[in-house]
Image: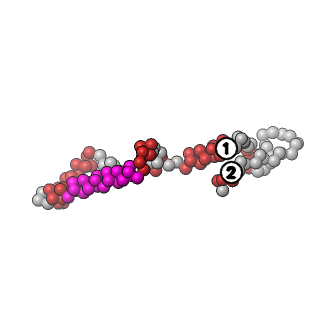
């Protein structure tokens, strides 16, 4: 839970026993137990209040999707761009490396024809 394995937990218990001493340790252990119980009671109360305020929609919420550890800005941008392209009837256009650099000269091909103008980028008025 706190990134502490079994060995580290035992070391912490021994240090607590040495620092607090055997006469004060039961009192502090009792206070810690009371703190944990009150934190659990607070969490259950908050969950009950959320369930009461949201009603039946509370069970339909995908809590995994709201987990901040799942946040990936690249995925969010990719999904937003995909949705924007799906809304338009126009598919994304892949540009050649010459068009991407804006040079207008494609070094891979040898032709004397002028380079065509790059295709327009899809524009979403709702996103601006």
- Name the residue located 26 percent from the left edge and 56 percent from the top edge: 38
Residues 9 and 36: in front is 36
Q: How many marks?
A: 2
Which residue does the numbered mark 2 point to in the structure image?
Answer: 124
Q: From this view, report whether residue 82 is shown above or below residue 23.
A: above
Q: Residue at x 42, y 50 (%)?
A: 54
Residue 16, percent from left and from top: 20, 56
**59 left or right of 84 in image:** left
Residue 35 percent across, percent down from the top left: 24, 57
- What is the magenta range? 31-53
Closer to us: 23 or 61: 61
- Disc 1, SS: helix
Q: Residues within 10 Å of mark 1 (few under 14, many from 20)?
A: few
Q: Which mark is residue 11?
A: none
| Residue 43, magenta (yes or no) | yes
Q: Answer left or right for 8 relative to 61.
A: left
Q: Could you say where residue 90 lies in the image, as x and y percent from the top left?
A: 72, 42
Give the distance between the C-alpha atoms of the residues marked 2 and 1, in whole angstroms: 9 Å
Tell me the quadrant of the picture where the C terminus can be found.
Answer: bottom right
Q: Would you call the spot at circle 2 few (<14 residues within 10 Å), some (14-19), or many (20 or more)?
A: few
The answer to whether the residue labelled 2 contacts the one labelled 1, judged by CB atoms less than 8 Å apart, is yes
Left or right of 22? Residue 121 is: right
Left of 105 or right of it: where is 2? left
Q: Which residue is mark 1?
A: 87
Q: Secondary structure at mark 2?
A: loop
Of the residues under marks 2 and 1, which one precedes in the sequence? 1
Question: In x, y percent, where is residue 67?
Answer: 45, 48
Residue at 19% x, 53% y is 14
Q: Does residue 21 appear anywhere in the picture?
A: no
The residue lying toward the viewer, choosing from 123 and 15, is 123
């Amino acid at each position: 839970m706190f990134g502490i394995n079994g060995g580290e937990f035992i070391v912490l218990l021994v240090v607590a026993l040495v620092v607090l001493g055997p006469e004060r340790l039961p009192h502090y252990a009792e206070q810690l137990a009371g703190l944990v119980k009150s934190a659990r009671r607070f969490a259950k109360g908050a969950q009950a209040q959320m369930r009461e305020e949201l009603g039946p929609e509370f069970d339909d919420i995908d809590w995994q999707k709201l987990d901040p550890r799942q946040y990936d800005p690249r995925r969010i941008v990719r999904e937003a761009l995909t949705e924007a392209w799906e809304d338009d009837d126009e598919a994304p256009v892949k540009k050649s490396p010459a068009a991407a650099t804006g040079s207008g000269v494609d070094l891979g091909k040898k032709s004397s024809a002028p380079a065509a103008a790059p295709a327009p980028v899809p524009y979403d008025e709702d996103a601006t």
